[in-house]
Image: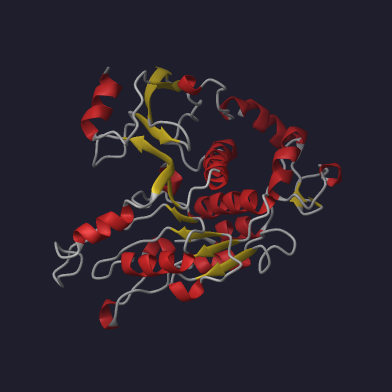
Amino acid sequence: RHSNEETKMLVQPATVISQQSTMRACTMYSHVPPHQVRLGKTGQQHNGFRAFSSRHVARASRRSRFIVRASSAKQEGVQIPTFLNNTPHLRETRQFFYKDIADSIVRAVEGGEKRMRVKSEFPEMNTDMDVYRIGTALEMIRVMVTELVQDGKRVKICVQGSMGQGVFQGLPLSLAGVRRIMEAMDWGEDMLGNFINLAEVGPDQVQPNDDVIIVFSPTSIVGSSIIPTLEAMCETIGDRPVILFNPRIGDIPSSGGVMQVRGRQGRMDFENTFETVYHFRLLYNKPYHFPIYGALRKSYGAEWEIYKRKSITKKEENYALTPVTFKKEPNAEQITRAIRG
């Protein structure tokens, strides 16, 4: 599932496409002073950054309308990128989601949250869609981790290994090869092994000097639940922050009697100990993934927001924030009423 092109993109540092984006790129690589980052001919490398020609800069400026920023007024929400069914996404679209989730995580850790869960599920991050791109998920993790490291935190990223026994042993397809790609990624000079460490999911993987632990997409499979391993790991972590990134830990009943009624309440209670500090997903008429009716979003410290997608012309659309917000995640009926209202 992971092409060589995606792996090469992750191994290389972030791309600088204009002078205005230089400062944004340096946030991911704080060890490179902004004045040392220069642009040149296409394909040349300057201080670890790839330079683009004026043609690419012009194209980026034409697409600048997709760059979105949070409004200062809470009730105004954010300007969500448009045409999200067009894949691969624009770099500006990805950068919006990277920054949106990273800001919430940093504020949540600073706010003293201990058990957190985050979910970002636009098309390139949706494992149920054939446009799922592992490179986007790993780039998002890199931005999140870099922001935490810049605050002086030592971060450990945990990726689960094979689960089950015998012929039923396996690994979710969305996690196949992820650990190997992470080891080859560019995390910054002298970062990997010092401020950033990689490990598997398990209580024996936690070290005393780990300040923040991120569990990358923990996933239960048929015949084996990830929750007992997570539970043991969280007991070892204690009161340190732990973040579940795009978890899929719900019960998957099988003929083997695993994840049935027995013990379900305990698994649900454990799952409820995690606070949702960020959530974004598009709203469809399930089970279809088209058309997009809107979006559901929550950031740390804010309520759940519902956005309605409005098509203005064939080449123009926007997402309008509905007037009602929710303290808890709204159910299907509440979402439908808000979209139709």
Left or right? Give the position of 195 relative to 113: right
Would residue 250 be visible to someone looking at this image? Answer: no
Q: Quadrant of residue 281?
A: top left
Would residue 324 be visible to someone looking at this image? Answer: yes
- The percent position of residue 186, horizontal first and vertical second, equals 67, 60
Q: Compared to 143, does 318 lie above or below?
A: above
Seen at 55% across and 49% down, the residue is 140
Seen at 32% across and 31% down, the residue is 291
Q: Give the colour scheme of this rendering.
A: secondary structure
Tally of numbered discs: 0
Residue, far bottom? 166
Left or right? Give the position of 204 relative to 170: right
Left or right? Give the position of 193 relative to 75: right
Q: Compared to 203, does 29 lie above or below?
A: above
Closest to the observer: 298 or 28? 298
- The percent position of residue 180, horizontal first and vertical second, equals 54, 70
- The percent position of residue 340, horizontal first and vertical second, equals 26, 20
Seen at 50% across and 52% down, the residue is 137
The quarter in which the C terminus is drawn is top left
Q: Compared to 271, does 121 lie above or below?
A: above
- The percent position of residue 271, horizontal first and vertical second, equals 32, 55
The quarter in which the N terminus is drawn is bottom left
Seen at 14% across and 62% down, the residue is 261
